[in-house]
Image (cartoon, helix red, strand yellow):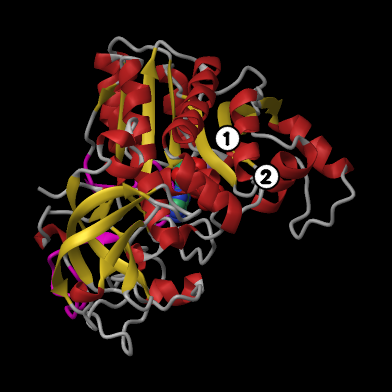
Amino acid sequence: MRTKIKSILHSKSPELFLEKEVTIAGWIRTVRDQKSFAFIEVNDGSCLANLQVIIDESLKNPDFTTGASISVTGKLKQSPGKNQALEIHASTIRLYGKSDPAKFPLQKKRHSFEFLREIAHLRPRTNTQGAVLRIRNALAFATHLFFQKRGFLYVHTPIIAGSDCEGAGSMFRVTTLDPTQKNKDFSQDFFGKPAYLTVSGQLEGEIIACALSDVYTFGPTFRAENSNTSRHLAEFWMIEPEMAFADLKDNMECAESYLKFCVQYVLENCIDDLQFFDQFIEQGLIERLIHVKETPFEHLPYTKAIEILQKSSQNFVFPVEWGIDLQSEHERYLAENYFKKPVILTDYPSKIKAFYMRSNDDGKTVAAMDVLVPKIGEIIGGSQREERLDILQQKILDFGLKSEDYWWYLELREFGTVPHAGFGLGFERLILFVTGMENIRDVIPFPRFPGHADF
Ligand code: ATP
Ligand code: MN
């Protein structure tokens, strides 16, 4: 039976494997030919490290080249080399698939991330992408662990939405109508009306929270905004907790604890991959993560943040005045330069936030919160929701929306309304934050962005 390399190299008691026969399988990373024997480095993706295989003259094969797939059976021995503790002395090797070294695109040198994006089918075989995907997996697991431990239910909200209820941005249309047909009649369309891909599961999350108390969604989210930035994707994954009988304070506590839990989880479970990122992607990464985990986040009302930005000597591209929607340059200045840690901004002007956020008593601001982190800016956006029927009705009118479209949302306030709050976290931004990677296109295996929908 095949053993994963991780369970050998990361075993709590590797001595149990010593002098025993094991079979591993994976892809050849490098071959170093010596006179009477050869070293083959094999990687199977289960961990960053390769396992070194030693083969003697009789097993040598010119088809053992970088990229080829093999399985190896042999005795595991202590390695005299300084780079690894264990190695396999091969007794048999099976070649599964050759890989012509003259044609194989992944050479030993480091490739640019731009180049690697063009070969998304081979990119997972690189150290960086392997580490990203293992951390992505760990963060997904940590997300479920965190919310499940707190008694949140994982709920599934629809991917096809009837309308842009949240107003979160441009949507992709879902239709079975003939695209060449002019003057389309959407009453003849599949759903009998226009339909779109979801931009958020929040409103449906609220419905379920207003019955089951604490819930979260974790699903794909689509935005057709033409944002060609290193922090936006057209298809990304969002985690959206929603809590009944909770206010903005509870919301902030949940967001901060969740981020810290994720950081703690990868520090405990993915240290090899983090060390790799610390060495090759962002120097000081691990120190930064420990700092995040141990330092209370700064809490600050929007109005105070505007004052800080106005007093700063920074030359912002977008001028700062009360009422503006903060740009990522402003958000990053606050988190990165001014406070040097994650910041939770609250109480934004109602005009720049969605209609459902709870009005504050000042009549100008709402109980919104954005979590801003160094390097990225906004990683979480959330709020306490307006639970008062009359105020919500007025807000819907003020925002030029139609009450009929929100009849069910209003009924949640009519029948047994409760204070409730929640937030949305962009999963890929969390991965950027934890790995130090610079571009969001490199932390999802098959990125979707303007002009890019192929594999
Ligand atoms: P931004 O201002 O950065 O475009 P937003 O305010 O439009 O974000 P929200 O509607 O608040 O985003 O969505 C909640 C979270 O989802 C954001 O805090 C962010 O982490 C993530 N997010 C939003 N849009 C995208 C996107 N296009 N690609 C990846 N993540 C996104
Ligand atoms: Mn937001």
Q: Looking at the rendering, in which quadrant would you find the C terminus?
A: bottom left
Q: Is residue 104 above or below residue 55?
A: below
Q: Which residue is mark 1?
A: 370
Q: Nearer the viewer, residue 278 or 259?
A: 278
| Side (left or right) of 291 relative to 161 | right
Q: Nearer the viewer, residue 356 or 444?
A: 444
Q: Is residue 79 magenta?
A: no
Name the element at disc 1: strand
Q: Which portion, as a residue range, is magenta?
A: 158-184
Q: Which quadrant holds residue 19?
A: top left
Percent across and percent down for residue 235 are: 35, 56
The residue carrying pointer 1 sits among few (fewer than 14), some (14 to 19) or many (20 or more) residues within 10 Å by Cα, namely many
* Residue at the (19%, 75%) spot, across then down: 58
How much space separates mark 1 and mark 2, taking CA atoms?
A: 10 Å
- Residue type of the residue flagged with mark 1: Asp
The extreme bottom residue here reads 102
Percent across and percent down for residue 140 are: 34, 38
Percent across and percent down for residue 112 are: 51, 74
Q: Is residue 393 in sight in this rendering?
A: yes
